[in-house]
Amino acid sequence: MTTPQQDKSAAAPPEPWSRLTWAVLLCALTCGTLLIHGYHPLAEDGGLYVAGIQYTLDPSLFPHYTAFVREHLRFSLFAPAIAAAVHLTHLSLLWVLFLLDILSIWLTLFSARQILRRVLPAASSAVHLAGVALLAAWWTMPIAGTSLLLMDPYLTARSFSTPLSLLVIAYALGADYARTGFCLALAAVLHPLMAAYALAFLVVLLLSRVSRPLKARIMSWLALTAAAFALAALLQSLAPPESSALRAAAITRYYWFLSQWQWYERLGLLGPPAILAGILYLRHGKLSKNAITLCHSCLILAAIITAAAILFAHEGSAVHLVARLQVLRVYLLLYAVMTILLGATLYQVSKRPVLITAAILAMAATMFYVQRQSFPLSPQVELPWRADANTNPWVQAFVWARQNTPRDALFALDAKYVNTDGEDAQTFRATALRSALPDYSKDGGEASITPALATTWQQAADAQKDLSQLTDATRDARLRPFGVTWMVLHADAQTAHPCPYSNSTVKVCSLTP
């Protein structure tokens, strides 16, 4: 006959998996994440960061419009740290970027498990794995309308500030404030703005952790909200007047302004709070104190930040300081926490773990498909030893420019070339190692947060507008005052200038004297 004690033992959760088991699983998930979501080191913001690193390694690069390469380096040690890694390891920059991207994936998955260990301490290791696996499956999920992804398929300062911010949350939940402070400080030297969001999360979390009656905690949250609004109003009132060029640059960043979001992007602001509120309501009696605190913190922070964006971030404002701070980007952390808790909760409540596993695999397959549509002409994983063998025709043209034009050449491209179908958002400077006039999209982002660059950006972007559709006379009149010596045009562009390189999509042409 089975005794009550034996029944209790039978119902107990299995022993936690060993550190070795978790190490193997995290390494396997890291490899899977890389293959599913891809790796494109010189695309999108990755190219901006890489150009800055290249300039740090060799200041003779990019002799023209250098400010658009080095400006974002002023407040971060990310580029110097990567440059130092290149010097110390004697590896190429592309190899260092690749290895560090793998490390950043592993660190993010590790930080997710650290959170789960503290909010679901009694859950089985399989439950924790489900939360980490869902994060891996949703790796490149868009964060509402913020223009951010949960994690990027390339290396940037966010690749490390995000896992460090998650570790800030995990260690704060465990009251390990020495490690909390260390991770926050390290995130701050890599990405000050994202670290500021982590600090905001930490403040709300600490207020929510205090063992006080609910009414007292509500009063503290209201006081925090009032303080946040007062600070935003003060910053907005003290901001200097903006030039017309700076206002034009700001308006191009539609994601700064909630009123310009599409309806489905606004729903993206409601998703994480709704899911976390659902977990609180449905699982409240079975959640640990830390889990409840974490959910409350996410809900309060989402409410404060969304209200601040509604009140102070308007495209019609005389100044856009609060909008420039992009406060809604704190949702990156909210999405990460929501994803981790959702995966673990679904596994806990499911009577069919195999079904949940199949669902996560199906979502990963969907994300793989989306990534292939986003980078259709580029390899899924751009390996460092095959960089110059990239089959993307734009990249091939950029590589030719690097190998066959003078180091002091100045290029012009269509102002919105990174948004062209099939270009796959591959950046010219980082690939060609040549100077280029500021473009509308990526350099516009830099101009929007750096007033000194706004006028130069606006003039250069206007000069390159619809470049491939212009006549030689119009192109020459626009570009010669800037000192342009080379152009990248669409293959069907009409020009009498010599074009020593061409493929089916683009051609590289000399702007002859």
Image (cartoon, rainbow, N blue to C red):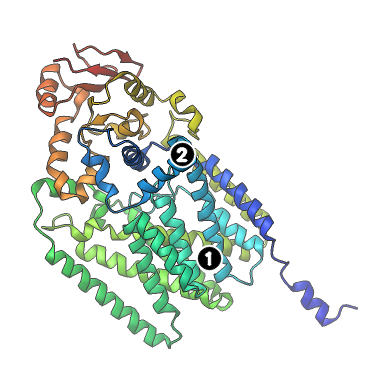
Q: Can residue 370 be seen in this view?
A: no
Secondary structure state at the residue bearing disc 2: helix
Residue 326 shows in the view? yes
**Residue 143 appears left or right of 405:** right
Q: In this view, does 435 lie above or below 210?
A: above
**Whole-percent x, y for residue 481 in the image:** 9, 27
Q: Percent position (x, y) of residue 11?
A: 75, 73
Task: Give x and y (percent) for residue 22.
Answer: 65, 56
Amino acid at dot 1? Ile
Determine which residue is flagged by label 2.
371
Within the image, what quadrant is residue 390 found in?
Answer: top left
Residue 179, percent across and down? 48, 68
Q: Is residue 437 above or below residue 302?
A: above
Q: Pointer 2 and pointer 1: residues touching (CB < 8 Å)? A: no
Reading the image, the residue beneath label 1 is 115
- Please, is residue 449 above or below residue 220 in the view? above
Which quarter of the image is occupied by the C terminus?
top left
Picture residue at 19% right of the left edge, 59% below the top: 321
Q: Quadrant of the N terminus?
A: bottom right
- Report the amino acid beneath label 2: Gln
Label 1: how many residues lie within 10 Å, few (<14), some (14-19) or many (20+)?
Answer: many
